Image (cartoon, rainbow, N blue to C red):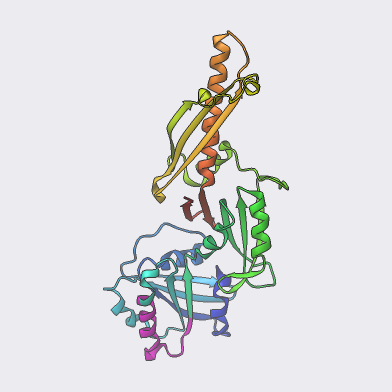
C-alpha cells in the first residue's frame, strides 16, 4: 500500500520526518488503512473514539499518521490536529453513495482552514467495487483479486480473475484489457479458468469444486443448501408414437434446491435433472442402486446451477468479500 501514497510524498520531497493527518467519515476504513501501512496486513478494527497514532517507515522516510475518528460528534475536534500537518489523507467510502455529499462538505470545510493551506492532500477512495459492475456482465466468476503493480513499469493494477465459464473469461480479457477501470489508471487483466476453452460450449464447475470454493472463502458454516424437491419424473413423458415406444425407457430424477449465504443475504436456486436408460431387469437391488445414483446426480447438478448464479468476488487477502446472486 506504500506505493499508493507515493504521489503524496512527491509533494514532500526532501523531508525525512513528516506528520500526516488521516480523517474521513465514520466507517470509511481509516483505521484499517493505518494498520495495513503499519503492519502490512489487514486487522480487525472497532469504531475509533478519539484517535490512533502510529509511526510508519516508508523507504527512507518516517512519518507519523494520526487516525482521527469520524463520527459527527467528533468532527468538530478535527481542527485540534491541524497544526504542523504536512500531509492530509481524506478517506472516502466509495460504496457509501448516500453520504458522498456529506464527505464533500467536510473536505471543503477542512480545505478552507488556514492551518492546512500548505498541506499536501490525498483523497483515498476506499472499498472500490466498480470492478464488480465491469466484469459481472461476462457471467459468474468466483474470484477477483486486485494486485498493485509494484514490479511493473506502467501504472495501475492487475486484476486476476477466475471464472466459472472459460468463454466468458476470454471475452472479458478482450473487452477489458488495458482499459482505465480502476482509479483512473490502466488495468491489465490476467484471466484464468478451471476449465479449458471449447469452441461451441463452455463447462461450468462441478458441484464438488463449487463446495470447495464456498468452504474456503466462506467457511463450512458460512453457507448451506436446502433441497426443496427431489422427485422421480420418469413417467411424465409418454411416447407419442409407436416408434418412440420401442426406445428404451428412461429413469429421470428432478431436484430443486437453494444455496443460502446468510451473512450476505444471498439465496440462489438451482434445478438439476439426471436420467439413464432403464434396462429390463427384475433385480430390485439394481433398481434401488440406479435410483440412488440418479438422485445424487440430480442434486449435484442443481447445486452446480445454483452456484453459477452467485458472483463471489474476493479482494486482496480475503478481507473483503462481495457476493451477489443473479436472478
From the viewer's side, name the closer residue of 289 and 223. 289
Please indicate, yes or no, whether residue 52 appears anywhere in the rendered image.
no
Total label count? 0
Query: Is 18 located above or below residue 260 in the figure?
Result: below
The N terminus: image quadrant: bottom right
Q: Is residue 161 left or right of residue 100?
A: right
| Stretch in magenta | 102-121
- Quadrant in the picture for residue 280: top right
- Quadrant in the picture for residue 23: bottom left
Q: Pick out the residue farthest to the front.
A: 241
Query: Is 175 located above or below residue 210 in the figure?
Result: below
From the viewer's side, name the closer residue of 61 and 166. 166
Magenta-drawn stretch contains 114: yes
Residue shown at 37%/77% (left/top)?
Answer: 101
Q: Is residue 327 left or right of residue 208?
A: left
Q: Pick out the residue farthest to the left.
A: 73
From the viewer's side, name the closer residue of 77 and 298. 298
Please indicate, yes or no, whether residue 108 appears anywhere in the rendered image.
yes
From the viewer's side, name the closer residue of 307 and 129. 307
Residue 245, horizontal then vertical, whole percent: 62, 20
Residue 178, horizontal then vertical, whole percent: 67, 68
Residue 44, horizontal then vertical, whole percent: 41, 57
Residue shown at 48%/73% (left/top)?
Answer: 124
Amino acid at each position: 500500500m506504500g506505493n499508493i501514497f507515493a504521489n503524496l510524498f512527491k509533494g514532500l520531497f526532501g523531508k525525512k520526518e513528516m506528520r500526516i493527518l488521516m480523517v474521513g467519515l465514520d466507517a470509511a476504513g481509516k483505521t484499517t488503512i493505518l494498520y495495513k501501512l503499519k503492519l502490512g496486513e489487514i486487522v480487525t478494527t472497532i469504531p475509533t473514539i478519539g484517535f490512533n497514532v502510529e509511526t510508519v517507515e516508508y523507504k527512507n522516510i518516517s512519518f507519523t499518521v494520526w487516525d482521527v475518528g469520524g463520527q459527527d460528534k467528533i468532527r468538530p475536534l478535527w481542527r485540534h490536529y491541524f497544526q504542523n500537518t504536512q500531509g492530509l489523507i481524506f478517506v472516502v467510502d466509495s460504496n457509501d453513495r448516500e453520504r458522498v455529499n456529506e464527505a464533500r462538505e467536510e473536505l471543503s470545510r477542512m480545505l478552507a482552514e488556514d492551518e492546512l493551506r500548505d498541506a499536501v492532500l490525498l483523497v483515498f477512495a476506499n472499498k472500490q467495487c466498480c470492478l464488480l459492475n465491469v466484469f459481472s456482465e461476462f457471467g459468474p466468476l468466483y474470484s477477483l483479486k486486485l494486485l498493485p503493480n509494484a514490479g511493473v513499469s506502467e501504472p495501475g493494477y492487475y486484476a486476476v480473475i477466475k471464472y466459472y465459464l472459460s468463454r466468458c473469461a476470454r471475452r472479458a480479457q478482450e473487452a477489458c484489457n488495458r482499459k482505465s477501470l480502476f482509479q483512473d489508471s490502466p488495468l491489465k487483466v490476467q484471466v484464468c479458468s478451471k476449465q479449458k476453452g471449447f469452441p461451441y460450449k463452455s463447462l461450468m464447475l462441478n458441484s464438488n469444486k463449487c463446495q470447495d470454493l464456498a468452504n474456503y472463502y466462506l467457511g463450512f458454516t458460512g453457507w448451506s443448501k436446502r433441497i426443496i424437491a427431489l422427485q422421480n419424473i420418469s413417467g411424465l413423458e409418454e411416447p407419442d408414437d409407436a416408434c418412440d415406444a420401442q426406445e428404451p425407457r428412461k429413469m429421470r430424477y428432478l431436484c430443486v434446491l437453494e444455496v443460502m449465504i446468510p451473512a450476505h443475504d444471498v439465496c440462489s436456486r438451482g434445478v438439476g435433472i439426471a436420467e439413464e436408460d432403464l434396462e429390463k431387469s427384475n433385480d430390485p437391488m439394481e433398481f434401488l442402486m440406479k435410483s440412488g445414483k440418479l438422485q445424487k446426480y440430480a442434486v449435484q447438478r442443481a447445486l452446480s446451477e445454483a452456484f453459477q448464479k452467485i458472483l463471489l468476488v474476493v479482494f486482496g487477502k480475503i478481507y473483503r468479500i462481495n457476493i451477489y446472486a443473479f436472478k
